[in-house]
């Protein structure tokens, strides 16, 4: 049993595909497949159920892959601890962020963090919360920025800021002169939302349960919205297709946003989200986490609150 073989089985479990796992490990598929088969023979168990179009992790395989991930994390930690006196602010920091936070926080965060820790470049990934959580637990990310609640064993979480939601609508909309909008009023509108899997969508529907019906746009438009980003949805709202809800940091200051969109606050109670930073409790660079937190708080959007 080798560390390389452990990396291979973790990759196969993550990708659910031998070819993609081989690409992620920078080896040929036969090399990876032979190594995985060798490890299975050594352990005397089947780790993966293989079919022509699918790879599934067996029950015992799930436990072994999880343990392999912990072993790889401890090996990485051991390498850092072995270099006494190493600067914790030197070397890349692998940061993940959900899709509805990354584009609006990172433009200010990157230069701010570079000023605080110039020898600690960011390796950034945007993804869904579930995917980021998995990669964090497996040691493939060092920290992630997510919305609360977020409760994962072995993961430390710290609240960063609260961000209220706002309503975005075309300037021609009948509400454009209103001072504020009640969440319940959205149920009667053509509401454009992100697709399933985005926690922001769930947060909006929690604030307006009746909106699940108004969010069911028919046909091609619905398919377009489901695969879109908040930025794309803003463009569609500006063109007059419907209205949407945005985190206040995503309202934008660009030319079209000022001229074609009306941004309205919610009436109380104002829906919003709590943004947090999460990292493994065993992560061996606590100073890096502290500096990252300081940088995030320094560059958060003015609409955010403690």
Image (spheres, rainbow, N blue to C red):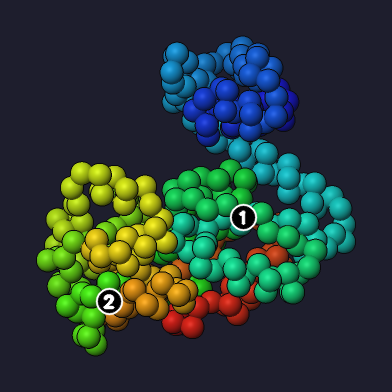
Where residue 98 appears, x then y in whole percent?
Answer: 47, 57
Where residue 28 appears, x then y in whole percent?
Answer: 68, 20
Callout 1–callout 2 Cβ contact below 8 Å: no
Secondary element type, mark 2: loop
Corner quadrant of residue 108: bottom right
Quarter of the image containing the N terminus?
Answer: top right
- Reading the image, the residue beneath label 1 is 124
- Reading the image, the residue beneath label 2 is 171
| Picture residue at 34% right of the left edge, 73% below the top | 260
Left or right, 303 with respect to 266, comes to right
* Mark 1 / mark 2, whichever is N-terminal: 1
Corner quadrant of residue 220: top left
Q: Residue furthest right?
A: 84
Q: Residues within 10 Å of mark 1 (few under 14, many from 20)?
A: some
Where residue 5 appears, x then y in whole percent?
Answer: 68, 25
Q: Residues within 10 Å of mark 2 (few under 14, many from 20)?
A: many
| Picture residue at 66% right of the left edge, 38% below the top | 71
Q: Is residue 249 above or below residue 157?
A: below
Q: CA distance from mark 1 to mark 2?
A: 35 Å
Left or right, 175 with respect to 43, comes to left
Q: Is residue 61 above or below residue 243?
A: above
Residue 60 in sight:
no
| Picture residue at 23% right of the left edge, 75% below the top | 172
């Amino acid at each position: 049993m080798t560390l390389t073989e452990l990396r291979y089985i973790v990759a196969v479990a993550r990708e659910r595909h031998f070819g993609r796992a081989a690409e992620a490990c920078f080896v040929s598929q036969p090399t990876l497949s032979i190594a995985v088969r060798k490890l299975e023979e050594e352990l005397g168990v089947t780790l993966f159920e293989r079919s022509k179009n699918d790879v599934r992790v067996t029950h015992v395989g799930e436990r072994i892959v999880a343990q392999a991930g912990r072993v790889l994390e401890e090996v990485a930690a051991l390498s850092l601890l072995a270099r006494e006196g190493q600067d914790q602010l030197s070397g890349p920091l692998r940061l993940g962020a959900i899709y509805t936070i990354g584009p609006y926080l990172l433009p200010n965060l990157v230069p701010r963090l570079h000023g605080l820790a110039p020898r600690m470049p960011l390796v950034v990934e945007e993804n869904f919360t579930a995917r980021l959580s998995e990669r964090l637990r497996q040691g493939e990310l060092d920290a992630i920025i997510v919305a609360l609640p977020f409760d994962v064993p072995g993961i430390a979480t710290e609240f960063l800021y609260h961000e209220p939601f706002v309503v975005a609508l075309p300037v021609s909309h009948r509400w454009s002169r209103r001072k504020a909008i009640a969440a319940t009023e959205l149920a009667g509108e053509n509401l454009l939302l992100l697709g399933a899997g985005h926690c922001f969508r769930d947060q909006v529907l929690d604030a307006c349960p009746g909106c699940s019906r108004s969010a069911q746009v028919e046909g091609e438009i619905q398919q377009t919205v489901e695969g879109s980003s908040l930025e794309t949805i803003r463009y569609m709202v500006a063109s007059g297709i419907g209205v949407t809800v945005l985190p206040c940091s995503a309202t934008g200051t660009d030319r079209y946003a000022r001229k074609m969109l009306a941004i309205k606050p919610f009436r109380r109670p104002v829906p919003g989200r709590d943004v947090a930073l999460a990292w493994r409790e065993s992560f061996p660079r606590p100073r890096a986490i502290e500096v990252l937190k300081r940088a995030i708080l320094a560059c958060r959007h003015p609409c955010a609150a403690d």
